[in-house]
Image (cartoon, grey):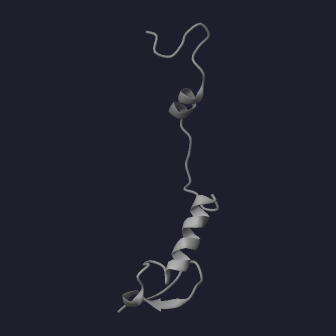
Amino acid sequence: MSIIVCSVCERVFDTATSTAMPFCSERCKTIDLGRWLGEKYSVPYERTEDDEEEDSPPPRGRTSGED
């Protein structure tokens, strides 16, 4: 038996009684998913020089796939 707080509604609940762990209910689980899909949450990401090279277009006169 472990008691935790739901991260969505902040309700205290027993983990043994929840079928939607780590949330207290399916409702809170769905709300959390909606927040991710609506981009209210995000994972931090730092761009590197390699990322910038991949985003830049190929040099003039060359198309991708030419060697």
Q: 36 or 1: nearer the eye?
A: 36
Q: Nearer the viewer, residue 45 or 60?
A: 60
On-image quarter of the N terminus:
bottom left
Quarter residue 62 falls in: top right
Tell me what residue is drawn at x 53 percent, y 34 percent: 51
Q: Is residue 8 above or below residue 64?
A: below
Which residue appears at 63% of the width and 59% of the height? 38
Quadrant location of the C terminus? top left
- Residue 23 lies, with reference to residue 34, above or below; the image says below
Q: Is residue 17 left or right of residue 29?
A: left
Residue 17, position in %: x, y? 40, 90
The relative height of residue 8 versus residue 50 in the rendered view (above or below) is: below
The total number of labels drawn is: 0
Q: Residue at x 50, y 78 (%)?
A: 26
Query: Residue 24's x, y, as percent?
Result: 49, 84
Q: Position of residue 5 (x, y in %)?
A: 51, 85
Q: Nearer the viewer, residue 11 or 27?
A: 27
Outermost residue, top direction?
Answer: 61
Rendered residue at 58%/78% (across/down): 8
